[in-house]
């Protein structure tokens, strides 16, 4: 995904425009748009595919059962929702939780690009196969989940969608292990960045909620050869709380 200069100067401005957006047909069936939520200076950004029924009703990303699981996974890092930013590729719910059409994704893409540009996260965690493919088209979720992938000045950490984990205990454990790699992904992003000093301070404030040595360990570079040899299904789940992403 290429990043272009944002026409907006703040994440709130983007959100305001999203709330009244009618650029694609999803505006006709949504209850309300779901711009995203969290810290506008987050070091870690989570991106799903699109809002589900609960999100559409409440205007917030990742609520309901999948959202609760995501919260518990964040706690183990440890992170809170306020530490990260959570959004979706499309900001309005496709009817019946269908996949968004290419023209809908294209219409909504400037918002996501602008959010990434303004928030400037170190790590992008994609939730589910479809979201991963927006950033890593050659990827395969069964092979690439939990891998730390350099996508320029950031790193990508694709993980299974929480809704998939709710349906499949094996994926649940895989997702847990993959989410534990977030600190390592942050470290890797710092290694990639020439101004690691500024970045380190920022990440420490954004990621650490206590004095745990999240950045004090020596970087683990095992990700360079991939993290998983799990044989996970490529298309293993739908979901109820959020769109069907697998
Ligand atoms: S999905 Fe995106 S482009 Fe389409 S109406 Fe909603 S905010 Fe606008």
Image (cartoon, rainbow, N blue to C red):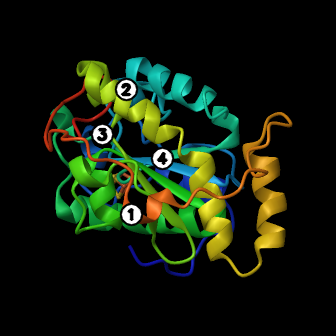
In this picture, is 242 found above or below 68? below
Front disc: 3 or 2? 2
The residue tagged 3 is 93
Q: Which residue is mark 1?
A: 225
Can residue 111 be seen from the camera position used here?
Answer: no
Residue at 53%, 45% in the rendered image: 181
Q: Are marks 4 and 2 in contact (CB under 8 Å)?
A: no
Q: Residue at x 15, y 39 (%)?
A: 233
CA separation in Å, label 4 and label 2: 23 Å
Quadrant hosting ligand 1: bottom left
The quadrant in which the N terminus is found is bottom left
Cα–Cα gap, marks 1 and 2: 21 Å
Q: Is residue 48 left or right of residue 73?
A: left
Q: Nearer the viewer, mark 4 or mark 2?
A: 2
Which numbered disc, 4 or 1, marks the residue that appears first in the sequence?
4
Judged from the image, the secondary structure of the residue bearing numbered disc 1 is: helix
Q: Quadrant of residue 162?
A: top left
Q: Is residue 242 visible?
A: yes
Q: Alpha carbon of mark 3 to alpha carbon of mark 2: how far?
A: 28 Å
Front residue of 147/65: it is 147
Q: Which residue position holds label 4?
A: 87
Q: Earlier in the sequence, mark 4 or mark 2?
A: 4
- Return the residue nearer the eye: 40 or 72: 72
Q: Position of residue 185 (x, y in %)?
A: 57, 56
How far is disc 4 from disc 3 in space, using C-alphas?
12 Å
User: How far across and down, in percent of the image, does residue 159 sit?
Assistant: 37, 44
N-terminal-most mark, 3 or 1: 3
At mark 3, the secondary structure is: loop
Q: Residues within 10 Å of mark 3 (few under 14, many from 20)?
A: many
In the rendered image of this protein, does residue 209 appear above or below residue 154? Answer: above
Q: Which is closer to the viewer, label 4 or label 1? A: 1
């Amino acid at each position: 995904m290429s990043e272009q200069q944002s026409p907006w100067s703040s994440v709130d401005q983007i959100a305001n425009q999203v709330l009244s957006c009618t650029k694609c047909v999803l505006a006709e069936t949504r209850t309300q748009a779901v711009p995203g939520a969290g810290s506008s200076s987050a070091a870690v950004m989570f991106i799903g595919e699109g809002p589900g029924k609960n999100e559409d009703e409440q205007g917030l990303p990742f609520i309901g059962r999948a959202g609760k699981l995501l919260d518990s996974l964040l706690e183990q890092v440890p992170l809170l929702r306020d530490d990260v930013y959570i959004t979706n590729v499309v900001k309005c719910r496709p009817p019946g939780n269908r996949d968004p059409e290419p023209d809908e994704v294209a219409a909504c893409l400037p918002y996501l690009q602008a959010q990434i540009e303004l928030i400037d996260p170190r790590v992008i965690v994609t939730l589910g196969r479809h979201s991963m493919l927006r950033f890593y088209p050659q990827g395969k979720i069964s092979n690439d989940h939990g891998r730390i992938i350099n996508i320029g000045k950031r790193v990508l950490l694709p993980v299974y969608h929480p809704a998939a984990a709710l349906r499949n205990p094996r994926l649940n454990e895989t997702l847990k292990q993959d989410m534990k790699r977030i600190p390592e992904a942050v470290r890797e992003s710092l290694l990639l960045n020439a101004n690691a000093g500024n970045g380190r301070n920022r990440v420490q404030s954004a990621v650490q909620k206590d004095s745990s040595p999240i950045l004090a360990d020596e970087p683990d570079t095992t990700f360079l050869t991939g993290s998983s040899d799990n044989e996970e299904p490529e298309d293993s789940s739908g979901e109820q709380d959020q769109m069907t992403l697998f």
